[in-house]
Image (tube, rainbow, N blue to C red):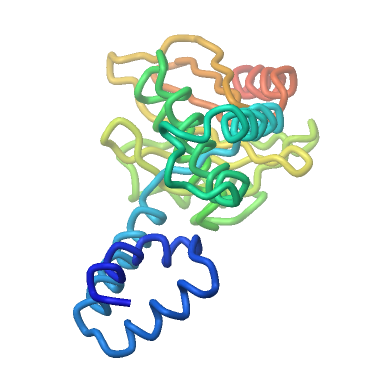
Amino acid sequence: MNHDEASRLLGAYLDGELDLSASVKLEEHLAGCESCQRQLAEQQELLEVVRSETPRFVASPFLKTRIRAALREEARSAPGGFWKGFSRAWLYSGAAAAVALILAVTFSWRQGLPDFVQEAVANHVRSLQASHLMDVASTDQHTVKPWFAGKLDYSPQVVDLATSGYPLIGGRLDVLQQRTVAAIIYQRRKHYINLFIWPSGGNSVPAHFYSQNGYHVLTWTKSGMNYVAVSELNEKELRDFVKMIQDQT
């Protein structure tokens, strides 16, 4: 395998798309080619940056089923065009489905939703996937509330709803609309609720319900504070949670 052939195959090699024979030949070339080794390292670094910085969203089972069905139909009926150059095995692989899911879910969330709602959902998902759900873990509102003192220029009200089936489990600092905000974390069975709170400052958020791709969001303003609740809980339970928060703030 010459240098030009090896250089063209580096991306496919990183993605695990080469067959065994091509992989062996490429690895033999890499062993003696410092230029290709540098290219491979640069592409690997870029791939890791993209994976770490790209927001991820959990697609509903219905969406996954539709995308996989579309991929199968495309592979059967249109072997040329856009899919030309991709192996049939790749079309059925998890990589193809993952790329399609990321694109479909990300674009659908960006259609017609306020920026602060998009940011809140992204923060919610990131907190679950990055294992950074809480900066302070406690079921005691008298522990969570004082923790924010000195870290914010306001004091968020922290409500304990354990007796109603929505226990407080902690809090953390987050960022919305280019300012640091409080995120109060509650749990409902195996689901988590991120409740973002910050002063409205004359810029109140509308009282509204958003639902898309399995995520539900409720927004409102009360007593000079903006609230955004995000969760995968069903609409009724999230509305029940919000009603209890509103009654006690």
Q: Where is residue 222 in the image (x, y as percent from the top left)?
A: 47, 15
Q: Where is residue 111 in the image (x, y as percent from the top left)?
A: 41, 17
Work out whether 24 lies above or below 181.
below
Corner quadrant of residue 116: top left
- Please state, as top left, top right, bottom left or bottom right, where the N terminus lies in the image: bottom left
Q: Which residue is drawn at 51% across and 30% down?
A: 105
In the visual, does 55 lie left or right of 177?
A: right
- Please state, as top left, top right, bottom left or bottom right, where the C terminus lies in the image: top right
Q: Position of residue 212 (x, y in %)?
A: 57, 21
Q: Residue at x 31, y 71 (%)?
A: 6
* Depth order, front residue of 21/174: 21
Q: Which residue lies furthest to the left in this view?
A: 35
* Depth order, front residue of 122/87: 87
Corner quadrant of residue 176: top left
In the visual, does 212 lie left or right of 119?
A: right
Q: Residue furthest top?
A: 207
Work out whether 29 lies above or below 188.
below
Q: Where is residue 19 in the image (x, y as percent from the top left)?
A: 53, 67
Q: Which residue is drawn at 54% across and 73% down?
A: 20
Q: Residue at x 71, y 33 (%)?
A: 61
Work out whether 190 lies above or below 208.
below
In the visual, does 12 lie left or right of 244?
A: left
Work out whether 1 lies above or below 163.
below
* Depth order, front residue of 212/6: 6
